[in-house]
Amino acid sequence: MHTQILCYTDSMKYSNSILRSSLLIVIFFTIDSLVGQTTTSSPYSRYGIGNLNQQQFNVNVGYGGAGIALRSERFANIINPASLSSLKFIAFEVAAKTSLYGISSDGQSASSTNAFLNHLSLSMPINDKWGLSFGLLPISSIGYKYSYFEENPIVNTLQYDYVGSGGLNEIYLANGIEVVKGLSLGFKGSFVFGAIEEETKIFLLDQTNAFNTSDRSRNNISDVKFDFGAQYYKELNDDYTATVGITYGFGSDLNGSKTQLVRSFIGNPDQLERFLDTTNFIRNEKNNLELPSNIGLGFSLEKKEKWIAEINYTNSDWSNVTPIGNEGYADSQTLTGAMRFLPNKNAYADYFKLITYSFGARYTNTYLEVNGQQLNEVGINFGLTLPFRKSISSVTIGAEALRRGKDKDGLLQEDFLNIHLGITFNDRWFIKRKYD
């Protein structure tokens, strides 16, 4: 008979204490902040369901949003829920973003800054082959405010003011299970919720005491959607491992209810409006919102404890979704390439060798067609994962430079510099001393 005792280091006790004492406070604070925040200032977010957010966690930062064929013992990778089967540690993480935004068109430019919380998650291994994760993250964001002028032969000059805010979020529960050696399957169920608020004002600038128009609407969304994933990894030899992954998101017809109020008013753009009459009022009208099906493929090659390289391709079937408004939808494709240089876990005397370095690049044909042209995006990424001293927890810092659209042919060019700051607390919970 012998005794086996599993011990914690002082640093693991310290991180465990921080995690347990702050978990509930951070959860409530983050949920409230995520749901009510403004995350973009893009005029393009007026179309469709807004700007789509990459569903990347801290492990994907600097990795270009790749992750279909990525597995990790310490980080949750929700891009492919099948990867959760590789978890060996509890992973509680929260992340914030700052987006530096610039827009240019016809020689004019403007800029803005938005800072917001990005996601919250708690992930854990149930056993050696089963991992679970749940959390909250954004799907899309809407935030715009701009004006447009039009010359009319009857009323001379018209001014259109457009204002919008809101977006969609999801609370998810995901599982990943290794069903046979090397093959893992994953499933994610999400409760999607959010609201889209929009207002259009039309001013007759050259008419005295003209009756202007205000059209304000709010669309509340709440429903469920489901995603599936699979991964297969194979050890090629003692040093190299290859992984292939596939993801599939089922198309969803989300339940919504729309309230719309159209009124006439007197007042110039720089004056307080005096509302006169209600010309149309719709209350809680059923107004479903469609999300497309999507498929993703990924391949990675890893040299153990040295580096991992990955390539991803995704396609979203937006052309079969009924557009909102007059804009068009097109199938969206994204091609991503990424690489991570893994730390030397034994280099305790050289901290820089403990840092994980990530690089990535992606090209996207977005789902929006504006003025008959499909918008494109191109981005490059860089990230660092900085471990705590004498601990397996870490801080992740990342940057993404992204360009969308172009300053010609009646379009706008948008440039983003997105700064990501995330923290991941890792620990081993539920482990008790064993005697045999």
Image (cartoon, grey):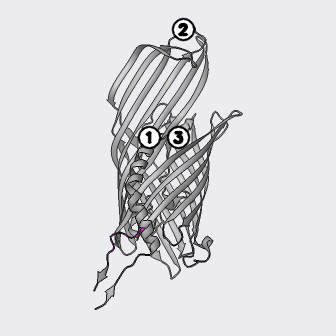
Q: How crowded is mark 2: few (under 14 residues within 10 Å), some or many (20 or more)?
A: few
Residue at image position (44%, 66%) is: 15
- Residue named by callout 3: 368
Residue at image position (58%, 65%) is: 339
Left or right: residue 76 compared with residue 207: left
Quadrant hosting residue 338:
bottom right
- Does dot 2 land on a helix, a strand or a loop? loop
Give the percent coordinates (x, y) of residue 233: 44, 72
- Is 254 part of what is drawn in magenta? no
Q: How crowded is mark 3: few (under 14 residues within 10 Å), some or many (20 or more)?
A: many
What residue range appears in magenta? 426-431
Labels 3 & 2 near each other (Cβ < 8 A): no
The residue mark sitting in front, 3 or 2, is 2
Amino acid type at mark 2: Asn
- Residue named by callout 1: 36
Q: Sequence-wise, which precedes: disc 1 or disc 2? A: 1
**Mark 1 → mark 2, Cα distance in angstroms:** 37 Å
Residue at image position (45%, 63%) is: 425
Q: In which quarter of the image is the C terminus?
A: bottom left
Give the percent coordinates (x, y) of residue 269: 57, 19
Residue at image position (39%, 54%) is: 135
- Determine the main secondary structure of the stretch shown in magenta: loop
Q: In which quarter of the image is the N terminus?
A: bottom left
Q: Is residue 5 something that shows in the picture?
A: yes
